[in-house]
Image (cartoon, grey):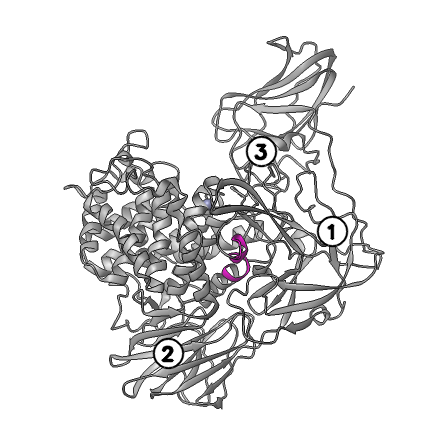
Amino acid sequence: MKTRRVRDFAALGFWLQSVALTTFAADQISVVQSLSLATTNRFYVANRAPLTPSPFVKLPIGSITPKGWLRHQLELERDGMIGHLKEISPWLDFQKSAWASKEGKGERGWEEMPYWLKGYGDLGYVLRDEAIIAEAKKWIEAAMASQREDGWFGPRELLTSLNGKPDLWPHMVMLNILQSYYEFSGDRRVLDVMTRYMRWENALPATAFGEGYWPKIRAGDNIESAFWLYNRTGEPWLLDLAKKIHANMARWDTDVINWHNVNIAQGFRAGTVFWMQSKDPKHLMSAERNYTKVMEMYGQFPGGGFVGDENSRPGYVDPRGGIETCGIVEFTHSFQMLTKITGNPLWADRCEEIAFNSFPASMTPDQKGLHYITSANQVQLDRHNKAPGIQNSGTMFSYSPFEVYRCCQHNGSHGWPYYAEELWLATADNGLCASLYAASEVSAKVGDGTTVKITEETDYPFSETITFKLTLPKPSTFPIYLRVPRWCEQAALTINGKSARVKAKPLSYIVVNREWKDGDSIGLQMPMKIAVRKWTKNKDSVSVDRGPLSFALAIKERRAKYGDRNANWSEWEVFADSSWNYGLVLDARNPAKSFRLERKPGPLAVQPFTPETSPISLKAKARKIPTWQLDRLNMVGALQQSPAKSTELVEEVTLIPMGAARLRISSFPTIGSGPDAREWVEPPKPKPAAFKTTASHCYESDTKDALSDGLEPANSNDRDIPRFTWWPHKGSTEWVQYDFAQPRKVLRVSVYWFDDTGAGSCRVPQSWRLLYKTGDDWKPVMGADEFGVKMDAWNRVSFPAITTTGLRIEAQLRPEVSGGILEWRVPEE
Ligand SMILES: [Zn+2]
């Protein structure tokens, strides 16, 4: 009997602190909930002091060979849009690109090419595809050859593109490309190029790291690269650089400081990355705190994403909103980083969750097109405008390989290659950890320096069983870590076919430390129970999980081709050819019992993420809710309160894994018959807008549509409904106006001011007046009783009747604060 001791490490906060550990009968098997930091891996590049010790270390790229469905995703990526993107992307014209020129002169020298190369190169390394590696190398060589004496490389234009100052953002992506190339090839020139570039960065004034919108917010990526280089060269000034970047960049370590979905997906971790240097527990905690805050507010549905269909916006929390494909892949990358930094298996769980349930549906099954927004409830993927239901106007839902989705079109590239590189990690005690589960083969140095090959055979996440087979030149003692996910309550283990008793709590690691011999094997069984989650913040809707997979209603998908931009590439809309408006009829006492698992016989399909090839499905009982329909934007109507009333027939419906469903309902209403059951109403179908709204300014996370959306504010600080604000304009005179299609008679208006005293810097204005349009002129409305600035109430203004084609509110903001409006009503007379 042995208890695995974990060193107490005070600064490590809630996860990496010493915890009581489960003991186990067999002396070589233990279960740990936190990781030993007493040692450092001998064979692979871990953190160098004074950075915090690395519980896990990434293996050199090429050590892991993905197999099974994951390999096929990479092959689809090679044969699909990413592998052939230069045929259609204007950013990848090698002859013209500023990234390919020795002088850094040329066109299109911003983020797009680096976004693509970041995943494209790794795709080649992971598949060992010589043609891709050669193409990637061409771009990498060109970028390295453009380095100047002072260390700058790449597009010269970036040196002055932020009002005369350098835009550091695209290089943050470029550094990731160089890091991967080095990890794969060991080409020492990469270290020299990065060292010279970071020396140039280090000579910049500290304020340079607080410049611009994207660079300031995303500079955590730059810190990660500085640590990466420091771990390889030991140059102490790299830590000064990291400190300077941290001190001047956006303050993710204090809060969620920006609500753009991709900024969140990569920025939320910035403080925890810097913790490796600062060792400040507040920094360690910041990623978890930020993640929880975002998900509690905007991620109340299955799939692992959140509503940030450009920005997360107050009042837009229904699962019909979604996350950008860039947001999905940046989230997976962040989760992989945090797994290695903290050793907390929860981050690997979160990585699997969004990778299995949201990422596959962001693309067509052949990966020849992708869309911008993937939502948990999304029943029609047409090409038409969804604004203001989705913040951006224009095409957002249909699948296309073209630049309509410019950033995601390039950035989606790193999703699966990075995933494949993180399946296995080296451990601090010279072992290996199966961190993300998928069929694969890993070859790595362990124990005394012996090279072990482990073959992982499984159809996970479609199967509960994983077999590991070891190949060794000689017996060797080293630990193998197996992650126990949060949903797994009764993991079972066999070693060489013999059952080994182990009691592993969810969110732990089973560690088997013994002398391993050639031909040894481990069997891991992770029983997947069906579970029902209730989303109280989204009208008591429910979702259904089995292990790491969440399920969606199987909807018959009709793909319709459109456009004729390029004979070899198509764009697709997807329409529902079967009903989707079902509520689930659940067993009241045990909701999980309402489902029956069905399994397709035969081997797993190479591409299991389609409705036709999905290997497992669930049968459930459901009734239609006839009033649940598409809204005027052809988006699925927002959820209403569950349980819902329905007198429709009970039908048997099929649920398939969410990732396999391009059309999906995965947040379901429930059907009730008791006194609490609600009658759903048809989504309001407003008349075509009788007026147009314009403003002197509207904050990007807010919307002008809030003014007339008909939602009654609960108070001036009601942050559950959409709002209009002039943020960040302060103390200025601002306006917002309605232009009527037809002249209207008006004799009163009502205004509900936004004021977030206690939370933000918006206040009711100092004063305001109303102007009306006559001909091309604006004239003040005279004879009004009072232009009120009351909080938490409607400010009603009456005046002698006017007939006009437009009304304008002109507000004088109070000094040093901004302002906004929740609702502005102009009654029809
Ligand atoms: Zn994007």
**Residue under circle 2?**
454
Bounds of the magenta span?
355-365
Q: Dot 2 lies on which element?
A: strand
The reply to whether the magenta stretch includes residue 477 is no
In this view, the mark in front (2 or 3) = 2
Q: Which of marks 1 and 3 is nearer the N terminus?
A: 1
**Amino acid type assigned to the residue bearing label 2 in the image:** Ile
Position of the C terminus by quadrant: top right
Q: Do the residues labelled 2 and 3 touch (CB within 8 Å)?
A: no
The reply to whether the magenta stretch includes residue 361 is yes
> How many numbered markers are drawn?
3
Q: Dot 3 lies on which element?
A: loop
For the point 73% across and 69% down, which residue is it? 594
Dot 3 beta carbon under 8 Å from ligand 1: no
Tell me where residue 129 appears, x and y as whole percent: 33, 62
**Amino acid type assigned to the residue bearing label 3 in the image:** Thr
For the point 34% across and 37% down, which residue is it? 108
**Residue under circle 1?**
641
Disc 1 crowd, CA 10 A, few/some/many (<14, 14-19, 20+): some
Tell me where residue 569 appears, x and y as whole percent: 48, 47
Tell me where residue 706 appears, x and y as whole percent: 63, 33
**Residue under circle 3?**
703
Position of the N terminus by quadrant: bottom left
For the point 74% across and 42% down, which residue is it? 683
